[in-house]
Image: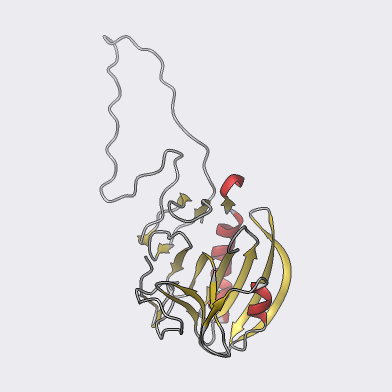
Amino acid sequence: MRRVVAFGAAAILLLGACATTTAPSSASPHPSITATPDGGASRGVVPAATQSAPTPSAPTPGAPAPSARGRLPIVGGNLSPGAYATTAFEPPLTFTLGPGWNGLFPDDPDEMAFEFGSDGGLYITRVANVVDPRTSTTTPVADDLIGWLAAHPALDPIAGPAATTVAGRTARSLDARAVAAAEVFVYPTGNMRFDDGWTLRYRVVPLDGPDLTVVVFGTSDGAFTRMAALAEPVVASLAIGADQ
């Protein structure tokens, strides 16, 4: 379930807890990880008289339990550095986070969101519907989402559209600066938006069904530069489904 969160001084709806609507709401958006190999130490046979069986160590209270493959689940709140795996998002994703990241909520089937202080964040989502900027109504996402974003009246493209790769797959990218606040992506529980002055990097990976969209954003040009340095290693570590 998406939540309404406060991002720095501005309220951001990435995933608002509002009812489904065909018109954009006034809420704001929600606003790194190499998969580790399976582990497990082997034990030699030791006579009982000389060595007792090892006692399993107790988990740290409040810490999320790692999966059988040693990857952590995404939770709301501070995320420890390490390898993560989605539990609800489809297709399954793995990635590596460095220190300082916060999850805004556990991953949903169609999105997840992370923030880093007040500078910005990283969104990973599968967009099925968008807000038409001319009519402010909900419409199915265009086949070419990057082209649609490049033509959006509230975005000023600064790099791209361009070909790129994500998780070893062909993708398209766009860097743009927001010249006005706008709601863009529509979800049953709220709309994703950006605010005036944000700088955003969109990458779209073709998938069966809604494409995978990765968004890195900063709340200013300087914040975006800092966020890109933090978020690009996360994106570089991303593995998708059977590619893991």
Colouring method of the image:
secondary structure
Residue visible at 53% across and 76% down? 218
Residue visible at 58% across and 64% down? 210
Q: Nearer the viewer, residue 231 or 203?
A: 203
Q: Nearer the viewer, residue 54 or 7?
A: 7
Residue 141 screen position, x and y as percent? 59, 73
Residue 44 screen position, x and y as percent? 41, 16
86 on left or right of 156: left
> Considering only vertical position in the picture, is 69 above or below 211?
above
> Considering only vertical position in the picture, is 197 above or below 122?
below
Residue 214 screen position, x and y as percent? 57, 65
160 on left or right of 21: right
Looking at the rendered image, the quarter that the N terminus falls into is bottom left
Residue visible at 36% across and 71% down? 3
| Residue extending farthest right | 163
Q: Quadrant of residue 5?
A: bottom left
Q: Quadrant of residue 30?
A: bottom left
Callout count: 0
Residue visible at 45% across and 58% down? 99
> Considering only vertical position in the picture, is 192 above or below 57?
below
Q: Nearer the viewer, residue 38 or 232?
A: 38
Looking at the rendered image, the quarter that the C terminus falls into is top right
Residue 203 screen position, x and y as percent? 63, 67
